[in-house]
Image (cartoon, grey):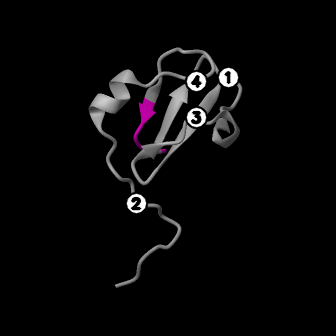
Amino acid sequence: MSHNTDEVPHVAVDPRLLEVLVCPLTKGPLHYDRAANELVSRAAGLAYPIRDGIPIMLAEDARVLDAP
């Protein structure tokens, strides 16, 4: 049985945590993208990564969203 080392296992994020988190830049709501394992701030145009079940809420670690 082979394992794909490129895949990062997703650790579940506490749903209660997702209810209270907001974007640190805009203070606006975040959308949980389960497939990408990110918290997306459409207002800021950023996607914050989730590592080992912990949201990394630093703008410098966020991915810039593609322009619409």
| Residue 41: quarter of image | top right
Residue corresponding to mark 3: 47
Q: Eyeballing the image, is 31 above or below 35?
A: above
Name which residue lies at 71% across and 26% down. Answer: 67
Name which residue lies at 66% across and 32% down. Answer: 65
Q: What amino acid is at disc 2? A: Pro
Residue corresponding to mark 4: 24
Q: Are marks 3 and 1 in contact (CB under 8 Å)?
A: no
Mark 1 or 4: in front is 4
- SS state under label 3: strand
How far apart marks 2 and 3 lie (CA) works out to 18 Å
- SS state under label 2: loop
How far apart marks 3 and 1 lie (CA) works out to 14 Å
Characterize the local packing of mark 3: few (<14), some (14-19) or many (20 or more) Cα atoms within 10 angstroms. many
Q: Eyeballing the image, is 1 above or below 36?
A: below
Characterize the local packing of mark 1: few (<14), some (14-19) or many (20 or more) Cα atoms within 10 angstroms. few
Q: Which residues are magenta?
A: 32-36
Residue 68: which numbered mark, if any? 1
- Which is the main secondary structure of the residues drawn in magenta? loop
How far apart marks 4 and 2 lie (CA) works out to 26 Å
Name which residue lies at 53% across and 29% down. Answer: 40
Going from N to C along the chain, the mark reached first, 3 or 1, is 3
